[in-house]
Amino acid sequence: MHSIRRIFSVGAAALVLGSGLVVGSSGAAQAAPSDCTGGAQGFTDIPDSLSGRGVAGAGAVVANFGGRPWAVASYAMQTGNVGGRQMGWGVLRTSSSTWGAGAIGSVWMDVTNDGKNSWIQCGPFSTTASGARITTPAYPTSSSASRSFRVCAQVTSASPVSGITCTPWW
């Protein structure tokens, strides 16, 4: 009888600990704009109108509905001079001709300082407006092989959802 109680107690403890780990970790992995705005973690806020030189390619995210594009947005990584420093940032532009009601376009930038072993996610930053242009905050570029950037985007709504697409690391 003693061994049955012991097995039950160990099993119950494992279940409680496992549940706590699942519940506790679900919120911690979520990134938010506040993680990189207002100068947080070395990022610099920039206006949505800032344009730079395109690097690392660009792409489009498309949410199809009924076999047709319902919401389309383009995204890119750009670099340029921000406050006297060379920096990189992400840009998302929503289509003015193909933007369904309730669509949400999101863009974020990942920055690694350790050769892509881990990274900081800046964003997502989102818009629901047709023909909108939004940017992520900028982060200093570096000649170090350890620092890399990529920009990712997605279009969502209540029904159609695009996949997440990213530029290559740059």
Image: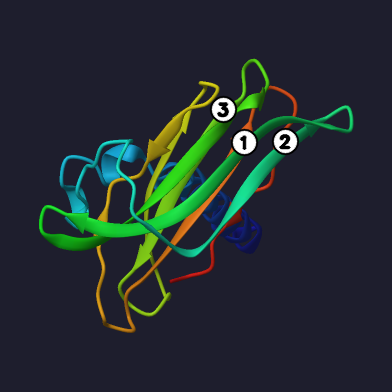
Residue ID for mark 2: 63
Question: Within the image, what quadrant is residue 88 found in?
Answer: bottom left
Residue drawn at point x = 89 percent, y = 33 percent: 67
Check whether the beta carbons of the residues at disc 3 and disc 2 lie within 8 A of each other.
Answer: no
On screen, residue 131 versus residue 135, left or right, reads right
How far apart marks 1 and 2 lie (CA) works out to: 6 Å
Residue drawn at point x = 43 percent, y = 45 percent: 91
How far apart marks 1 and 3 lie (CA) works out to: 6 Å
Mark 1: amino acid:
Val
Question: Within 10 angstroms of label 2, few (less than 14), some, or many (20 or more) residues?
Answer: many
- Which of 59/7 is in front? 59
Mark 3: amino acid:
Ile
Secondary structure of the residue carrying numbered label 2: strand
Secondary structure of the residue carrying numbered label 1: strand
| Position of the N terminus by quadrant | bottom right
Residue drawn at point x = 59 percent, y = 60 percent: 2
Can residue 29 be seen in this snapshot? no
Residue ID for mark 3: 104
- Which of 141/23 is in front? 141
- Which residue is at the far bottom? 145
- Which of 38/51 is in front? 51
Check whether the beta carbons of the residues at disc 1 and disc 3 lie within 8 A of each other.
Answer: yes
Where's residue 164, x and y in %? 62, 49
Residue ID for mark 1: 155
